[in-house]
Amino acid sequence: MWLMTARNKEDALRCEMIEQVLQDILERSGGSGSGAVIVVEGKHDVAALRNLGICGKIVPLSGQPLLNFADMLACSSDSVIVLTDWDRRGNELAQRIVQYMQPYAVVVDTGLRDRLKKLVRKDIKDVQGLGRYLAGLQRSTIKSIKHIK
């Protein structure tokens, strides 16, 4: 028998909280395309979110001019979830997207991104690493539970 360490408990809680954020993203984005549009930086981020079960509309920036991108978003959706990476460039992109969307009647959500950023701390810096990170937390949690039994 082996007791769960503080680190194992922290990992289990972090895993649960990340899964809750992903569930919130799934619910807000809707599965039928009627929910919020999720904005990510590139195609690898799209693939990562799909692998995590996010099935709403996900649009990558992929080097488009942000003003044109904001116009396109405003025409196609009344709600946007910004999930840019949580590195310096991702932070700047998130701020600029919010700024460029202000003239439109579009709800821009950066809160989910902020929650993820706090949960992964300095362990990962991008959306595409989220699946591998979450899987590692899940393995760590399962391993520690098996040792307790």
Image (cartoon, helix red, strand yellow):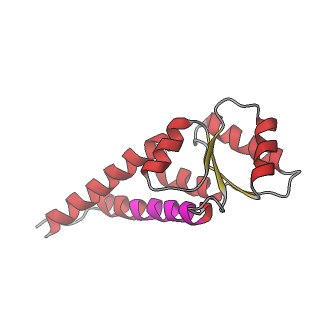
Say which residue appears at 67% left-offset and 29% top-offset.
63
Residue 126 appears in view: no
In the image shown, does 6 or 126 lie closer to the viewer? 126
Say which residue appears at 45% left-offset and 47% top-offset.
130
Residue 50 appears in view: yes
Where is the C terminus found, in terms of image quarters? bottom left
Q: Is residue 17 magenta?
A: yes
Position of 117 compared to 143: left or right? Answer: right
Residue furthest to the top in view is 63
Count of numbered marks: 0
Position of 133 compared to 105: left or right? Answer: left
Q: Is residue 49 magenta?
A: no
Give the image location of residue 79, x and y in percent. 73, 58
Q: Which residues are magenta?
A: 15-27
In the image shown, does 73 or 96 lie closer to the viewer? 73
Residue furthest to the left in view is 1
Q: Against 110, is 48 above or below?
A: above
Q: Against 30, is 45 above or below?
A: above
Residue furthest to the right in view is 103
